[in-house]
Amino acid sequence: MTHWANAYIGTPWEKGAQGPDAFDCWAFVRFISERHFDRHLPFIEVDADNLRVVINSFEKNEERGNWRRMTDEEPREDGDGVLMAHAKYPSHVGLWLNVDNGGVLHCVKGTGVVFNDAATLRRNGWGHVEYYRYIGE
C-alpha cells in the first residue's frame, strides 16, 4: 500500500495512549479523523482491558449519534467508521480506506496499527463488522 496511512503502520497499541507514538483503538480513530478528515471527535475514557466497559462505551456514548449506520449496498468512503466484534457486540473500532481494494486501518492490542482487508479481518476473528458514515455534530 502506497498511501499516507503507511506512516502509521506498526505504531504500537498501548492502553490509554493518545498518540502519536502509541494509541488505543479509539485514540487512533480520533487522531486520524482529525489529521486526515478534519473531524474533531471527543475523548472517551475506556478501560480497554474490561470488555464489558468497552462494549457499553460503544453502545451508549452520545458520539454514536454523529454516525449513521450504512447498509451493505452503500459504497464505502475514506474515513467511514468501522465497528468490529468477535461476537455480537462491537468492541473495536477503525476507519475504512479505499486503497488496495479497500480495508480497515486500525490499532490492535498486541499488534499495533494495521491495514486489513475484509478477508483478513475475518481470519483474525472479526466476524461481525458494521460500517458508519460520519454525519456531523
Image: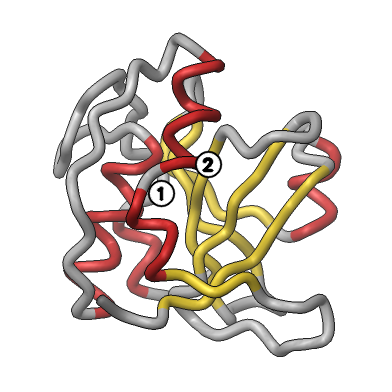
Across and down, in percent, residue 61 comes to: 38, 44
Across and down, in percent, residue 93 comes to: 51, 47
Secondary element at image label 1: loop
Tell which tag, 1 or 2, sits nearer the viewer.
Answer: 2
Q: Are marks 1 and 2 in contact (CB under 8 Å)?
A: no
| Residue under the point 56% across and 54% down | 115
Q: Which mark is residue 22?
A: none
The colour style of the image is secondary structure
Going by the image, does 17 lie left or right of 65? left
Vertical placement of 128 versus 52: above or below?
below
| Residue under the point 42% across and 34% down | 57
Secondary element at image label 2: helix
In this orientation, which residue lies closer to the viewer: 80 or 115? 80
Vertical placement of 68 versus 54: above or below?
below
Q: Which residue is mark 1?
A: 9
In this orientation, which residue lies closer to the viewer: 130 or 110? 130
Nearer-N-terminus badge (1/2): 1
Report which quarter residue 47 is drawn in: top left
Q: Which mark is residue 59?
A: 2
Give, as a three-letter code, the residue at label 2: Glu
Name the image quarter holding the C terminus: bottom left
Going by the image, does 116 lie left or right of 43? right
Name the image quarter holding the N terminus: bottom right
| Residue under the point 63% across and 39% down | 90
Disc 2: CA contacts within 10 A as few (<14), some (14-19) or many (>=20): some
Give, as a three-letter code, the residue at label 1: Ile
Disc 1: CA contacts within 10 A as few (<14), some (14-19) or many (>=20): some
| Residue under the point 69% across and 58% down | 130
Across and down, in percent, residue 24 comes to: 33, 32
